[in-house]
Image (tube, grey):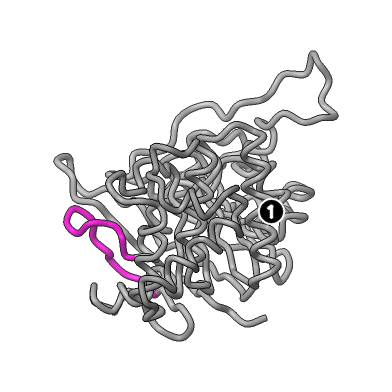
């Protein structure tokens, strides 16, 4: 399949009072055309920093892009200046942020906020952009779009504001949509509506999606492939079937064990992942998950595990997955 986005060895740090936080440490992944890819992991693992670096939205300083390539449709986004990136954002790559209330401008009607990108990127007149804004509100399921287009964000509910954010992100028919925890602040009924809407838009418009989330149920419903991040690194990747049915990394197994299941017995407790993520000002020399792992070996303390490939789509970075470790275990 054709790759629309190819991220290679991305490294991002933040300069803080105590030193340099190595937030993203050599992240590599790709997204195919028309594919939905999930990036999962607990808070602080580097998911949102990775997404915002792709969009070039992280402020510098304090952030520093130390290395890597973000190849989008044959162009390295890390080599573009701000003016060039303004032509990419909204037009080629759209983004849905986690909290729509802080992402929308409270002083502008939602119609004007949708129209901005259309006027800038599609060279539409104000009248045509307004008509397109009405169409987008209707497309994302907002009733009475002719009236709602004149209203301000505070006049919408949380779910409706998130729909407005989706309308803004999709107004120019971008090739790639990045959704950074788009359903976190919503109740489960609205979550289901938003996810159904994103799936329908992906099917109808052929948009590629990067979904950043904590919710593995959402991943199972929405996505084709899964990228598991921990301590600023990708520790496992695979199709959703491979990740859910045959996880290879102890962290992935820990995430799955900590999620309630319908087939779980009432007296069967959830098993949390004990401990806390490592301090990325002084990241560990070996595996970042070593201190919390029940299967850790001496080599895990001193050497970062290499990638072990199980299939064309399934990879994990764990010494227990190494062929020699499997041979010893047998």
Residue 62 among those drawn in magenta: yes
Q: Nearer the viewer, residue 98 or 106?
A: 106
Disc 1 crowd, CA 10 A, few/some/many (<14, 14-19, 20+): some
Task: Please report the residue visible at 49 percent of the width from the left and 37 percent of the height from the top.
Answer: 158
Task: Please report the residue visible at 57 percent of the width from the left and 49 percent of the height from the top.
Answer: 144
Q: Nearer the viewer, residue 82 or 229?
A: 82
Percent position of residue 23, x then y: 34, 51
Task: Please report the residue visible at 45 percent of the width from the left and 60 percent of the height from the top.
Answer: 168
Q: Nearer the viewer, residue 110 or 8?
A: 110
Give above or below for 189 relative to 52: above
How many numbered marks, from 0 up? 1
Give above or below for 238 relative to 154: below
Dot 1 falls on a residue whose secondary structure is helix
Residue reaching furthest top?
267
Tell me which segment is drawn in magenta: 56-69
Asked whether, in this view, residue 317 is left or right of residue 218, the answer is left
Asked whether, in this view, residue 265 is left or right of residue 238, the answer is right
Percent position of residue 60, x then y: 19, 59
Task: Please report the residue visible at 81 percent of the width from the left and 30 percent of the height from the top.
Answer: 262
Residue under label 1, please give it: 222
Asked whether, in this view, residue 189 is left or right of residue 62, the answer is right
Residue reaching furthest bottom?
74
Q: Is residue 302 visible?
A: no
Q: Nearer the viewer, residue 327 or 75?
A: 75
Percent position of residue 216, x then y: 65, 42
Q: Is residue 208 visible?
A: yes
Give above or below for 35 relative to 213: below
Residue 253 among those drawn in magenta: no
Asked whether, in this view, residue 18 is left or right of residue 150, the answer is left
């Amino acid at each position: 399949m054709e790759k629309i986005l190819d991220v290679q060895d991305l490294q991002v740090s933040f300069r803080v009072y105590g030193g340099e936080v190595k937030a993203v440490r050599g992240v590599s992944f790709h997204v195919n055309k028309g594919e939905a890819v999930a990036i999962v992991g607990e808070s602080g693992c580097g998911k949102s920093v990775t997404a915002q670096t792709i969009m070039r939205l992280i402020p510098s300083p304090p952030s520093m892009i130390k290395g890597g390539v973000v190849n989008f449709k044959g162009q390295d986004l890390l080599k573009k200046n701000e003016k060039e990136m303004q032509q990419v954002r909204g037009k080629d790559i759209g983004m849905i942020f986690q909290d729509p209330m802080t992402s929308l401008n409270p002083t502008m009607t939602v119609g004007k906020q949708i129209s901005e990108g259309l006027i800038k990127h599609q060279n539409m007149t104000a009248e045509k952009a307004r008509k397109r804004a009405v169409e987008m509100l209707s497309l994302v399921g907002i009733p009475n779009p002719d009236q709602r287009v004149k209203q301000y964000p505070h006049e919408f509910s949380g779910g409706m504001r998130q729909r407005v954010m989706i309308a803004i992100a999709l107004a120019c028919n971008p090739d790639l949509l990045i959704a950074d925890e788009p359903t976190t602040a919503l109740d489960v009924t609205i979550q289901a509506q938003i996810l159904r809407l994103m799936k329908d838009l992906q099917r109808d418009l052929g948009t590629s999606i990067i979904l950043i989330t904590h919710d593995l149920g959402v991943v199972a419903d929405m996505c084709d492939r899964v990228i598991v991040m921990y301590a600023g690194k990708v520790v496992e990747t695979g199709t959703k079937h491979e990740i859910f049915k045959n996880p290879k990394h102890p962290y992935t197994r820990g995430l799955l064990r900590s999620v309630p299941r319908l087939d779980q017995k009432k007296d069967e407790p959830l098993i949390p992942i004990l401990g806390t993520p490592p301090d990325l000002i002084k990241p560990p020399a070996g595996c970042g998950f070593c201190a919390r792992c029940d299967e850790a070996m001496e080599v895990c303390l001193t050497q970062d595990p290499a990638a072990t490939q199980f299939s064309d789509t399934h990879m994990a970075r764990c010494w227990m997955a190494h062929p020699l470790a499997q041979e010893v275990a047998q």
